[in-house]
Amino acid sequence: MMRRFLVLALVLVIGGVVVVAGAQAPKIGLILATGGLGDKSFNDQSFKGASEAAAAIAAQYGVTVKDVLDYVEPSDVSEYEGYQLQFADSGDYAVIVCIGFDQASALETVAPQYPNQKFVIVDMVVAGDNIASVVTNDWEEAFLCGVTAGYLTKTNTVGFEGGMEIPLIIGFMKGYTQGAQWVNPDVNVLVRYVGEWANPTLGAELAREMYNAGADYIYGAAGKSHLGVFTAAGENPNWYALGTDVDQAATSPEHADVIVASGLKRVDLAVKSQVMQVANGTWAPGIYSYGINTQFGFGTGIAIGHLDVNDYITKSASKVDVPCELIMKLVEAANGIKDGSIVIDH
């Protein structure tokens, strides 16, 4: 008598990795923020986190990363809703990850239409039973960068270059200003907004304005646009820059001699964590806060100097030497943020 067996899935163990053959690998749909890849900061970090999650899923299911991760790079805010609808309507994705605060409006329209589709949005809170909102205490990394600039300045004037004058970036500016004045009450902070996320040429022009007005350190939080700050800083041996979200002395090594430090925002960890929770069946909607003074206790910090000091102050690829006294002030600042004795107005 012949028996017929319907094989739903075959679990294999190869080299210590559990491979689920015959099962459908959960797919990731990633919608990046305008400006796209190559910003060496926010988008690239988000893509890194999604890619690492995709690699782990691909290994588990015996497929390739390309089988797991699809992504798009919108060039304008008006494209967000279309991409969200396209991904959701396909029914192909276990989770759709929306990068950037300005995807919120589109998501508020799209998510209710697909109640069984899981969404993640980074940098904004959107309510919904199928949405996880990932937010980060950006002002903490900005505060630490402000401490750095305020301590190191020789002119008592430093600068801040933001992408757009919106609450998110104003929070960066306030944190940076407060950090600079916490360590140096006499410091003056110049502020410029590019109005775009992907215009390094204009970013360089605005940086030169601030440098020529007396700033010797400028912190950028403007996506690709603030790459222009690094270019401008290289034009004078007394001008320096600070990066944001990642160690930009490592991602922009050609500018490692002018990038003294970079604020850290581990959006890669947040994105990877959200995706893996979906893959593991432990995902839940709600608000997830990352930062020094949050439920997780990690997610922000600064890359500076040549040694890892603690979870919040890590070594940088910068070629600029900094005094030990500054590192001690940064430790004091991070501890103050963590225990609540330093409250940052954002």
Image (cartoon, grey):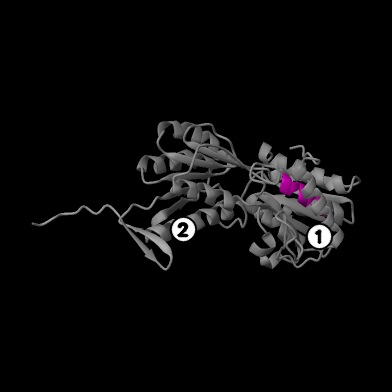
**Is residue 345 depicted above or below 56 in this figure?**
above
Q: Which residue is mark 2?
A: 56
The residue identified by callout 1 is: 239
User: Residue 108 vs residue 60: left or right?
Assistant: right
Image quadrant in which the N terminus is located: bottom left
Residue found at the very far right of the displayed protein? 186
Mark toward the viewer: 1 or 2: 2
Q: Position of residue 235 (x, y in %)?
A: 77, 63
Q: Which residue range is magenta in the image?
A: 140-148
Q: Position of residue 229 (x, y in %)?
A: 72, 56
Whole-percent x, y for residue 218 in the image:
77, 53
Name the residue at 58% across, 35% down.
Answer: 125
What residue appears at the point 57 percent right and 39 percent down from the top-left corner? 102
Instruction: Give x and y (percent) for residue 177.
Output: 80, 44
141 part of magenta stretch:
yes
What kind of secondary structure does the magenta stretch mostly adopt? helix
| Residue 244 visible to the viewer | no
Q: Is residue 326 visible?
A: yes
